[in-house]
């Protein structure tokens, strides 16, 4: 067995670039709780009244010790943060749901211990043995053990009625992982082939499954363990046991994760007022069994309560920020057009600005649905010359100047220019504005006839028209970008509709392969292996240019639609890259993959991702003022909000 740096639990370093100084924070694997450790006054009162076990019985014998960023904090206060509508569940996840087996460090470069205090990795990267911190308890006081981890994967995630396919992080070579208990505090994951990236994937939000489902609670909603489940399904007024399970136990990325106050969790705070239909806020209160302490032995979290106010529009959220009603926020307000307003109102709102370092590659990636259900549109989108012509017909510099205040540069896709795997062709090809060449290319592929309105006609006589799905509440800048693209493409005879829709419908249309095209910020700038959705059909929801191809890949050919050979080549290269711990060999595989992606030109990018920002109230401390901005590093969660504290 190869020891994963057993003393510190640190994994092999991920190939990332662009982050600066190391965080002023550390996390000890574990250590004896310091003498004189304290708890929040509210919990002490419950202990005194006999309603809660003493602190020593609620903490592990050797709890994980967190070094506060600035200073040991004080108990108390309500942290206020904003959500947008009824489908902003990831806004909660980013602050609260960071309790996996492992986690990222502040610089987004190393994997650190979390619920697993240490681990070993086999030399061939097929076996990962995790040693859990002994004595941790779920929020209802029930012990957290290896049985919970085995249950979460073997009984839940590998249940084909709950999951149509095993999540990509837990399957290699078309086969799901096998998880087995060694003893109460030790669990072994065995993959069918090398999975050298597993620790890094485990540190991301999509790696949370092993610690998401408490066996003693969630087993009640599985037919395997509950013979009377049909009656409970009927009593609950739902259509199936799977629907009941989701309502009670949730999943990583669905609102119901935060809608059941009874569900045991391992998070610093637990649901008090749930995220459910019609709710105007979500309230969470301190978990009395949380398993971390500070350097003086004080149980975390410091902050008593979280209050997520639900706004229906960004304007309301901005007003709350400016008037001092929000304590930390970057989600939804990190739009360049908002920055002058937020800068001008710092004194009024009593806040300071937070800087976000983008890990994304692309500010706006356009995905034409190459697997479209309409044969005529499918044929048009599948023509590489059509996609290249659209790219040349886009005035990127105008978009950058107007929408992004000149703070970017034309870019297609791929690792950012600072990354060691940067591929110039992938990033820069067809980014010049050349409408003459675009018109010539469109003429040559048989779109040389136009209607009276100047819009080109397809061979079947229909106008060259399609809609592009975009979520205005989540990415208003992408709406502005598309409006400019619409005018650029109209000038070369292509008509589009900027289709502004709600997030739930956006995903539904994608899942059903019912969209013409869609936009999303393109990931993979600093973490190209963790989110390669733009490089090949990898993500069943994210690779929106060919979702049926992703289903074929993730199901090992059992579902979806068989992709062309160039996709299969990239599947193989990626599988080879993620099967080796040798960074040089891994890089060689990925560079070959990028070369193929550049040649195929499946997506159309606009400009390099722009750095974001947010606000932190001046009396909220222990908060880093510069942090990565990434779904893989779900800011601000890896900064450990349980050690955030208020000053008087």
Image (cartoon, rainbow, N blue to C red):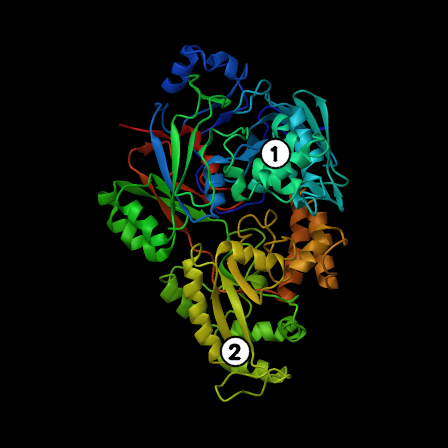
**Toward the viewer: 276 or 464?**
276
Q: Look at the image and tell me whether residue 580 can be seen.
A: no
**Residue drawn at point x = 32 percent, y = 51 percent:** 316
- Percent x, y of residue 204: 56, 40
Of 326 and 424, nearer the camera is 326
Pointer 1 or 2: first along the chain = 1
- Disc 1, SS: loop
Residue to which mark 1 is pinned:
11
Relative to 617, say whether 84 is above or below.
below
User: Which residue shows up at 65% across the image and 71% down it?
Assistant: 374
Secondary structure under tag 2 reads loop
Q: Answer yes or no: do the residues labelled 1 and 2 have beta carbons within 8 Å?
A: no
Is residue 75 left or right of 648 when viewed as pictured?
right
When the figure is inspected, residue 211 is found, relative to residue 360, above or below; the finding is: above
Look at mark 2 in the image and give the residue it sits on.
494
Judge left or right: residue 9 versus residue 562. left
Where residue 140 appears, as percent x and y from the top left, is 53, 23
Q: Nearer the viewer, mark 1 or mark 2?
A: 2
**Residue 136, image x, y percentages:** 56, 21
Q: Total number of numbered labels?
A: 2
Crowd around label 1: few <14 · some 14–19 · many ≥20 (10 Å):
many
* Residue drawn 58% across the image and 62% down it: 426
Q: Nearer the viewer, residue 440 or 229?
A: 229
Label 1 to label 2, Cα distance in Å? 50 Å
Please give left or right for residue 14 compared with residue 25 in the image.
Answer: right
Residue 117, x across and y down, in percent: 59, 24
Q: State whether residue 575 appears in this view.
A: yes
The quadrant in which the N terminus is found is: top right
Q: Quadrant of the C terminus?
A: top left
Q: Give residue 73's quadrant in the image.
A: top left
């Amino acid at each position: 067995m190869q020891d994963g740096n057993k003393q510190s639990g640190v994994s092999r370093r991920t190939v990332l670039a662009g982050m600066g100084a190391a965080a002023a924070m550390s996390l000890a694997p574990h250590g004896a709780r310091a003498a004189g450790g304290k708890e929040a006054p509210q919990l002490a009162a419950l202990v005194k009244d006999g309603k809660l076990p003493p602190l020593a019985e609620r903490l592990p014998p050797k709890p994980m010790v967190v070094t506060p960023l600035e200073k040991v904090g004080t108990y108390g206060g309500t942290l206020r943060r904003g959500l947008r509508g009824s489908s902003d569940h990831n806004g909660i996840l980013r602050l609260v749901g960071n309790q996996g087996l492992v986690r990222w460090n502040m610089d987004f470069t190393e994997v650190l211990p979390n619920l697993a205090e240490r681990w070993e990795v086999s030399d061939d990267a097929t076996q990962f043995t995790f040693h859990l911190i002994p004595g941790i308890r779920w929020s209802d006081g029930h012990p957290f053990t290896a049985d919970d981890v085995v249950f979460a994967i073997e009984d839940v995630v590998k249940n084909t009625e709950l999951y149509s396919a095993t999540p990509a992080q837990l399957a290699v070579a078309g086969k799901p992982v096998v998880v087995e208990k060694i003893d109460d505090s030790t669990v072994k994951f065995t993959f069918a082939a090398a999975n050298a990236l597993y620790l890094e994937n485990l540190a991301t939000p999509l790696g949370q499954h092993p610690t998401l489902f408490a066996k003693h609670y969630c087993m009640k909603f599985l037919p395997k363990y509950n013979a009377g489940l049909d009656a409970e399904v009927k009593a609950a007024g739902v259509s199936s046991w799977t629907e009941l399970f989701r309502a009670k136990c949730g999943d990583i990325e669905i609102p119901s994760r935060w809608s059941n106050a009874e569900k045991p969790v391992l998070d610093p705070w637990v649901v008090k007022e749930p995220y459910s239909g019609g709710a105007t806020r979500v309230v969470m209160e301190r978990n009395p069994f949380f398993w971390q302490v500070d350097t003086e032995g004080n149980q975390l979290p410091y902050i008593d309560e979280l209050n997520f106010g639900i706004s229906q529009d960004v304007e309301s959220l901005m007003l709350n920020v400016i008037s001092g009603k929000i304590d930390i926020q970057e989600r939804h307000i990190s739009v360049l057009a908002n920055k002058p307003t937020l800068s001008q109102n710092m004194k009024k709102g009593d806040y300071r600005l937070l800087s976000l370092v983008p890990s994304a590659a692309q500010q706006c990636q356009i995905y034409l649905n190459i697997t479209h259900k309409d044969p005529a549109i499918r044929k048009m989108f599948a023509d590489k010359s059509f996609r290249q012509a659209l790219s040349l017909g886009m005035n990127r510099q105008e978009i950058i100047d107007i929408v992004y205040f000149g703070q970017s540069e034309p870019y297609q896709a791929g690792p950012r220019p600072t990354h060691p795997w940067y591929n110039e062709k992938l990033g820069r090809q067809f980014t010049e504005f050349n409408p003459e060449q675009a018109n010539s290319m469109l003429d040559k592929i048989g779109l040389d006839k136009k209607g009276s309105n100047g819009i080109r006609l397809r061979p079947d006589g229909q106008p060259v028209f399609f809609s592009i799905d975009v979520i205005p509440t989540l990415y208003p800048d992408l709406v502005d970008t598309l409006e400019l693209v619409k005018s650029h493409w109209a000038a070369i005879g292509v008509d589009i509709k900027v289709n502004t829709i709600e997030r739930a419908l956006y995903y539904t249309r994608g899942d059903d392969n019912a969209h013409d095209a869609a936009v999303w910020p393109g990931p993979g700038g600093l973490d190209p292996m963790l989110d390669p959705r733009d490089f090949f059909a990898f993500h069943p929801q994210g690779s929106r240019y060919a979702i049926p191809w992703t289903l074929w890949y993730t199901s090992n050919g059992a579902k979806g639609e068989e992709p062309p050979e160039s996709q299969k080549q990239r599947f193989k290269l990626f599988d080879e890259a993620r099967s080796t711990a040798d960074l040089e060999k891994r890089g060689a595989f990925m560079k070959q993959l990028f070369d193929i992606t550049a040649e195929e030109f499946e997506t159309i990018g606009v400009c390099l991702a722009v750095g974001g920002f947010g606000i932190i109230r001046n009396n909220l401390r222990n908060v880093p003022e510069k942090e990565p901005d990434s779904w893989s590093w779900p800011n601000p969660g890896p900064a450990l909000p349980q050690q955030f504290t208020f000053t008087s």
